[in-house]
Amino acid sequence: MTTRKFTLTDASTGKTSTLEALSPTVGSDVLNIAPLAKDHGVFTFDPGFMSTAACESKITYIDGDKGILLYRGYPVEQLAAKSSFLEVAYLLIYGELPTAAALKEFTLSITRHTMINESLLRFYNGFHYDAHPMAQVSAVVASMAGFYHDSLDINNPRHREIFAHRIIAKMPTISAAAYKHMLGQPFIYPQNSLDYCSNLLHMFFAVPSEQYVVEPVAAKALDLLLILHADHEQNASTSTVRLAGSTGTNPYAAISSGIAALWGPSHGGANEAVLQMLEEIGTADAIPKFLARVKDKNDHTRLMGFGHRVYKNFDPRAKIIREACHAVLEKVGRPDNPLFELALRLEEIALSDEYFVSRKLYPNVDFYSGIIYSALGIPRDMFTVMFAIARTAGWVAHWQELISDPAMKIGRPRQLYTGPTARQYVDIATR
């Protein structure tokens, strides 16, 4: 794996160290800085981990400059066009696309694990009716460790597989229960006759008093969104799952920690912020004035849904969702959706403005995903929950990769301490 070596010399002492560069299958080399602490007594300083590779992984690759996203080597555009979410989940977990027989067996396993324990359903009654659904989902997922003692040995490959199937199967049920609790409606049990996304929509929108028929275009659009959100390399929530998992905690606790990290508005809540921004703009005539505020250094207005921490070009997922918006809005009877039309106009104006182009502020996946969720009837409080359902596949894959790695170590970042030096305690009477 090593291709290059670097020599680091301490100018004050003349002491040198040799640092090896590790080469990936694709992407930038990674410098192994482990000898620095031993040879020179120093650590690296990298706020936000902008230049730090915290692990080795074979799951997802991103080239931000070229707008490339690969799941196990497969371009996300191909998977979005030809695959299904459960097929992608299988790919992420097992490393290869399934055969027809393997996918059938996997789908059957997921379908038969969708029910949750009745005691878990009663947990929801402990939440106030207006409790945020992410609070409910993260708590219920963490509590699952108290119900599945039979498969919590993280060193047992079969236990890890059972957990993977269970959590992917139950996340829609857990999420739908949070939504129903928020509405004050009865819980709707999963239907094994429905596919993954149709079942999710059924649990969300069906009521006992009347028949509910899932619109195929809605289920297909949701499946597409789940594929595009299934994994995204070492983002904040995935890194959180890995860090929690490195302690040896049970997998439900690790996934719950990822859900909590995803809850942050800078991570999973961005698509909700996009809709709020579009509503604040109001009409296309107000776009120039809004963009002027964005460019004003003394104004704190932000252009939500543009730019990305990794992508310095178009987010490949945004292109796919943009096209899906048209089909969904037309099918659900809202082809002239004002927010979608406003989003298209905002994109057009912003991408003709040198200010945004020079800063490579292109639309990302969040710019359009919220519009589709809204068209499907999913409320904004549930947007991040939908993200969590999708990302569970990636979290599971990364957790499994971490636990099965014989070189795994507990995560322990270092720090640049700038607090007081050692000082003596002063009795309270003399302070």
Image (cartoon, rainbow, N blue to C red):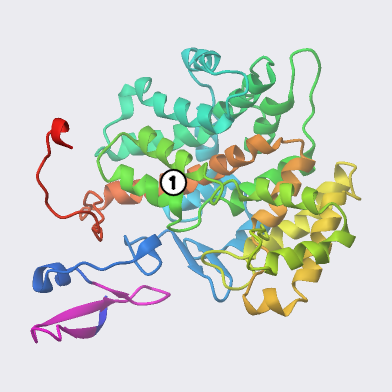
Q: Give the position of the C terminus as an image quadrant.
A: top left
Residue 102 makes an appearance in the image: no
Q: What residue did someone put label 1 on? A: 395
Tell me residue 213's x, y (percent): 79, 28
Q: Residue at x 30, y 40 (%)?
A: 157
Check disc 1 and give the amino acid type.
Answer: Trp
> For the residue labelled by badge 1, is the local secondary structure a helix, a strand or a loop?
helix
Residue that protrudes farthest toward the front in the picture: 430
Q: Give the position of the N terminus as an image quadrant.
A: bottom left
Q: Is residue 12 magenta?
A: yes
409 sits left or right of 58 in the view: left
Q: Residue at x 72, y 64 (%)?
A: 293
Tell me residue 349's x, y (percent): 80, 70
Residue 383 makes an appearance in the image: yes
Tell me residue 101's x, y (percent): 52, 44
Residue 254 sits above or below residue 189 on the image: below
Q: Which residues are magenta?
A: 5-32
108 sits left or right of 148 in the view: right
Residues 123 and 155: in front is: 123
Residues 106 and 352: in front is: 352
